[in-house]
Image (tube, rainbow, N blue to C red):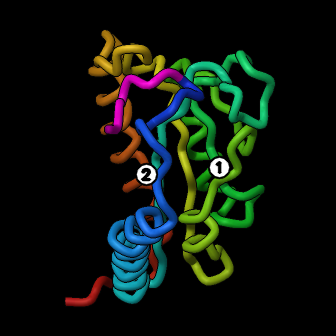
Amino acid sequence: MLDPRAPAGGPMYDRRLTADEVAARVARYHRPYQARLRAMLDDAHGRWGAVWHVNCHSMQEVASAMSTQDRGTPRPDFVLGDLDGAACEPGLTETVRAFLVARGHSVAVNDPYKGMELIRANGDPAHRRHSMQIEVNRKLYMTEDTREPNPGYAPLKACFSDLARHLAAYVATRIERTPAQ
C-alpha cells in the first residue's frame, strides 16, 4: 500500500482512505504521540525548570507541486523553523544556524518552513519552553528516488551527533535549577 519510493506529488496509497480510516489513524497514532511528547516535555520542564525541544524532518531537495515555493526551487541544506521567534529563544536558533554554517551547510530560517503543530504546541519561550523544527534536505543523506543512503549519510550522522553535544553544552549554561534527585 504505502510506497516509500512514490514520486514527489504522486499517490501514496493505491486508493483513497475513508474518513473512518483517517480518524482511526489520528486516534491511534497522532494523538497518543502528541500526548506522550507533551508529557515528556512537561516532566523535563518540571525537573529542570526549562525545556529545549528539537523536532527534525526531512525535505525534498527541490520544491514539489505541493510546496509554497515554485516547483523545482532548490532547497538549502537545512531550514530552521521557530515560528518567527515565537517558539524558542533567538539564541537557540542562532546557535543551531551558526553550528551548521560553520560546517559548510546552507541554512535558511523560517523559509519555507516556519515550524508546524509540534512547534506551536510546545514552544512558549516566556515560560522557558523552547521548540524548534529542523528540516534536513534529503540530498545530504539519501538518493531520493530510491530512498537508499548516499555517501553523505555517515557525515550527516556525525554532524548531528556533534550538534547534540553542542546543544547539550548550550542548554547546560541555561539551566537554573538543580535536577530533582
Q: What percent of the width, then of the height, locates residue 31?
A: 42, 75
The quarter of the displayed image where residue 42 is located: bottom left
The answer to which of 30 and 86 lies nearer the viewer is: 30
Note whether 117 is above or below 61 in the view shown: below
Distance (Cα) linking label 1 and label 2: 16 Å
Mark 1 or mark 2: name the one nearer the start of the chain. 1
89 vs 32, left or right, is right
Q: Which residue is mark 2?
A: 167
The quarter of the displayed image where residue 80 is located: top right
Label 1, secondary structure: give it: strand
Note whether 94 is above or below 141 in the view shown: below
The quarter of the displayed image where residue 112 is located: top right
Mark identifier at residue 134? none
75 vs 156, left or right, is right
Q: Is residue 172 magenta?
A: no
Q: Look at 42% across and 39% down and name the residue there.
A: 13
The answer to which of 38 and 168 lies nearer the viewer is: 38
Q: Is residue 4 magenta?
A: yes
Residue 100 visible in image: no
Q: What percent of the width, then of the height, locates residue 139?
A: 47, 17
Which of the two discs, 1 and 2, sits closer to the camera?
1
Q: Which residue is mark 1?
A: 81
How many marks on residues? 2
Magenta highlight range: 1-7
Question: Looking at the image, do the residues carrying marks 1 and 2 touch, with CB atoms under 8 Å apart?
Answer: no
Residue 47 visible in image: yes
